[in-house]
Image (cartoon, coloured by chain):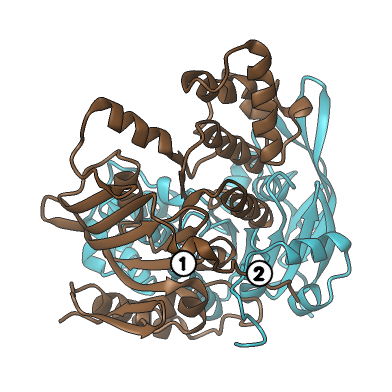
Amino acid sequence: MNAQPSLPVDGAEALAEPVVRLDRIERSFGVVQALRGISLALKPGRALALVGESGCGKTTCARIIARMDQPTAGRMYFRGRDITHPGAKADEAAYRRAVQMVFQDPFASLNPVFSIQHHLARPLKLHGHVSSKAEEISGVADLLTSVGLDPAVTAHKFPHELSGGQRQRVNIARALGVRPDLLVADEPTSMLDVSIRLGILELLSRIKRERQLALLYITHDIATAAYVAEEVIVMFAGQMVEWGDTQAVIRQARHPYTKLLLSAVPDPDRPFVPGDSARFLGHAEEVRRISRPASDTIEQVGPNHFIRALGA
Amino acid sequence: MNAPLLQIRSLDVDYLTDGGAFRAVKNVSFDIGRGELFGLAGESGCGKSTIAYAITRLSKPPAWVAGGEVLLDDQDLLKLPEAALQKVRWRRIGMVFQSAMNSLNPLMRVAAQFHDVLARHIGATKAQSRTRAEEMFKLVGIPAIRLDDYPYQFSGGMRQRIVIAICLALQPELIIMDEPTTALDVVVQREILEQVIDLQRSHGFSVLFITHDLHLMAQLCHRVGVMLKGELVEVGDVRQVSRAPAHEYTRKLWGSIPQLPGHGAAA
């Protein structure tokens, strides 16, 4: 009854040099091992989805990539250069310019006392992309147009005059104003109505394609990952449990946790059956139990499709 | 068929603004039967939560119920004196909101919060409350020993289940659930709703389930209503509304939901 999502197709981008690459990144908070052996590459013009439940480590991973946090082990590369340890100020500034974030809460991430014009002009001015008032105004207009908002209607408005979806578009425009190479979107649609999520996902896909941006899309909703990302990583308890081509992972899921995640996506054609809760809860608990232990054994199950063997 | 438990008749709710009254709910009528799961869907700002608040007269200014009736067993809640209404709230109509997990008092142990509700509404003693709380925890699948924990010691999903448990402890006839799982992961959402379905079956209460997710509503509810800009544009059996939506807006809403590739044909 619905249109099928048109899945992104692979092109030459798959072979390009990554903007950012993580190699066996670890992060522990005291005794809690929040991230274990995270390796991934973010390439121009391609999107990677990081999927998992609250507490699985996906936001910790985003914070490390955005340089808001430091890994406790492993290496990080920026255009092939090792940047694991903070370097010269100029290098740090270059990295932060190249990597921009879009946050989950569109209501909290805009300052209520400033107009949209002000919000979008700031990155343009701070990063020296404009040198006159006229350029500033046209720059903001271009940004708004690129995210599907009408500058004549939107620029002079204040955040409270916009809907959640419109605010999220402004947040994306603000990130684009810095002219980044990598956009990290942490649950950009989870606070929006389902009915406007698709529009935001399509916008992210278009920007990625047109600007050859690398995109890291973080979500707990595996169904939306298919709309944006060529590749997906399913995380559980700080580990990557299944990863590879989005199509393969979703259509031929192999890891029990990925299967659980897929089975929980709301499906109007499968009504809940009364009397089933004990079975489902028991099953979910069992899957979590067997997926939790650390494991270093990785199994290749397709051309670009991997799972982590269950630990002891 | 028995008389419906709740009948909403021509409900109008206004928000008073500087520019005059804005009608957020326009002439809305629907029934909820005994033991029925009724879903109300629509986008942000369509008035669905405004209806939830109006039913138990929790609307706060600038919201103002401008007209209509809310009949619980033929008794109009909108005309009831405040004292009588307090016997209806929680006792007969329970409420679970989206941020309900944040509505637990962070400074009180969970057991004390059960007692707070049970003592207030049915005059239970500490020992009676404890017994009841243990039964309720068992129902929602949390070990009874954890009653002595504080809210921060539970995950978001568990806190939401605790709120549902407190709500059920008074055995209400109707539970209003306003986006009860929107802030949670899909797996946790499914766990909670599967339990709600089972508890509904065993306890026989009715549910008004409010959500923006049509797919989820179709999995859960018997009958559904779709709202657009304050008006109820379509009401009917869940199969009919999902398979053959009559209203153009309902069709649009269905088509706009992200879903897994290969769904339907392959599954």
Query: Can residue A87 be seen?
Result: yes
Q: Which amino acid type is marked by label 2?
A: Pro
- Residue B181 position in % (x across, y down): 51, 60
Q: Is residue B218 above or below residue A27?
A: below
At a point 70% along the width and 20% down the height, the residue shown is A156
- Quarter holding the C terminus of chain B is bottom right
Q: Quadrant of the N terminus of chain B?
A: bottom right
Residue wearing tag 2: A5
Q: Amino acid at mark 1?
A: Glu
The quadrant where residue A42 appears: bottom left
Question: Distance of mark 2 from mark 1, alpha carbons?
Answer: 15 Å
Q: Which chain is brown?
A: A
Q: Is residue B233 left or right of residue A117?
A: right
**Rendered residue at 57%/18% (across/down):** A113
Question: Which of pointers 2 and 1 lies earlier in the amino acid sequence?
Answer: 2
**In the image, which disc is placed on residue A231?**
1
Q: Chain of mark 1?
A: A
Residue B139 lies, in percent from the top left, at 38, 73
Instruction: Please indicate whether residue B125 sits to the left or right of residue B37 in the image.
Output: left
